[in-house]
Image: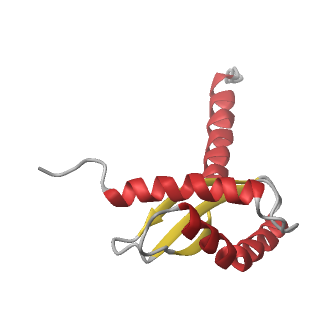
Amino acid sequence: MPKDYSRALRIADQIQRELSDLIRNELKDPRIGMITLTGVEVSHDYAHAKVFYTTLRSESDNFLTANGLEHAAGFLRSHLSHRLKLRVIPQLHFIYDESIERGVRLSHLIDEAVAQESSPEEPDSI
């Protein structure tokens, strides 16, 4: 009987919780400001983890955040090894999640379309 909530998903959720705590409390890099971890995907062999994040910063500052996270990946992995009881701690790969920005853009487009449709059109004069 297959499990709906596999071990990889449980490990990914735990990694997300622990990383958010580590970034908030332990990481002192000024390049990394307020970030939100939107998800974690762990490979089937638990060797790699894709960590998806988003920020409230501008696009130019996102480059600094990405560099800061890649620089801190070893530190975060080391601290994860103390918090998680796993034989293999995955290598962390940080990926900027654009889905929130895409959702905001689509919402604005929908609002504009609704506003244009609800505005009364001028009757044709003959």
Residue at position x 41%, y 73% in the image = 87
Q: Is residue 24 visible?
A: yes
Figure quadrant of residue 26: bottom right
Place of residue 9 in the rendered image (x, y in percent of width and height, measured from the top left) = 39, 55
Classify residue 11 as left or right of residue 26.
Answer: left
Residue at position x 49%, y 73% in the image = 89
Residue 104 vs 50, above or below: the answer is: above
Which one is in front, 109 or 35?
A: 35
Place of residue 79 in the rendered image (x, y in percent of width and height, measured from the top left) = 63, 68
The colour scheme used here is secondary structure
Classify residue 95 as left or right of residue 75.
Answer: left
Residue at position x 66%, y 33% in the image = 111
Classify residue 28 as left or right of residue 69.
Answer: right
Place of residue 96 in the rendered image (x, y in percent of width and height, measured from the top left) = 64, 65
Residue 63 vs 10, above or below: the answer is: below
Classify residue 44 as left or right of residue 80.
Answer: left
Which one is in front, 76 or 119?
A: 76
Residue 93 vs 98, above or below: the answer is: below
Quadrant where the C terminus lies?
Answer: top right
Figure quadrant of residue 57: bottom right
Q: Residue furthest right?
A: 30
Residue at position x 50%, y 54% in the image = 14
Place of residue 91 in the rendered image (x, y in percent of width and height, measured from the top left) = 53, 77
Residue 25 vs 47, above or below: the answer is: above
Which one is in front, 118 or 58?
A: 58
